[in-house]
Amino acid sequence: MRYAVLFEKTDTGYSAYVPDLPGCVAAGATLEETTGLIRGAIRMHLAGIAEDGEAIPEPKTIAEYIVAA
């Protein structure tokens, strides 16, 4: 499954979250570090959901850049 991940620049680096997986977040000093951390966070989050016997949520979020002219 492909989940949308949103990255935000912070004063100390970057943060990331997955809108379709509430509570699935990561933060790092660089975009590359944060990308790796959120990948691991998604895997752990999905493993926890499965371990609890719950259904894995289907991705619903669609992200797109819009040019405001």
Image (spheres, rainbow, N blue to C red):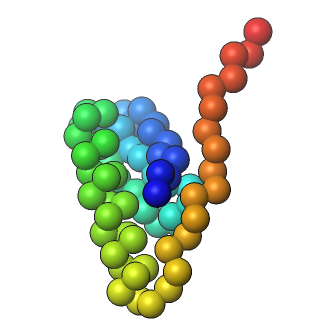
Name the residue: 37% across, 33% down: 11
- Residue 21 falls left or right of residue 11: right
- Vertical relation: 52 (above or below) 41: below
Quarter where residue 42 is shown: bottom left
Q: Is residue 64 shown to the viewer in this render?
A: yes
- Residue 7 falls left or right of residue 39: right
Question: Extreme top residue here?
Answer: 69
Question: Extreme front residue here?
Answer: 1
| Picture coordinates of residue 32, whole percent (x, y) | 25, 34
| Picture coordinates of residue 48, whole percent (x, y) | 36, 79
- Vertical relation: 22 (above or below) 53: above
- The residue nearer to you, when weighing 20 against 13, is 20
| Picture coordinates of residue 50, whole percent (x, y) | 40, 82
Which image quarter is the C terminus in?
A: top right
Name the residue: 49% across, 52% down: 3
| Picture coordinates of residue 17, whole percent (x, y) | 46, 52
- The residue nearer to you, when weighing 22 against 64, is 64
Question: Extreme right residue here?
Answer: 69
- Vertical relation: 46 (above or below) 15: below
Name the residue: 31% across, 69% down: 44
Name the residue: 50% across, 74% down: 56
- Residue 44 falls left or right of residue 54: left
- Vertical relation: 37 (above or below) 35: below
The number of discs equals 0
- Residue 68 falls left or right of residue 6: right
Q: Is residue 12 shown to the viewer in this render?
A: no
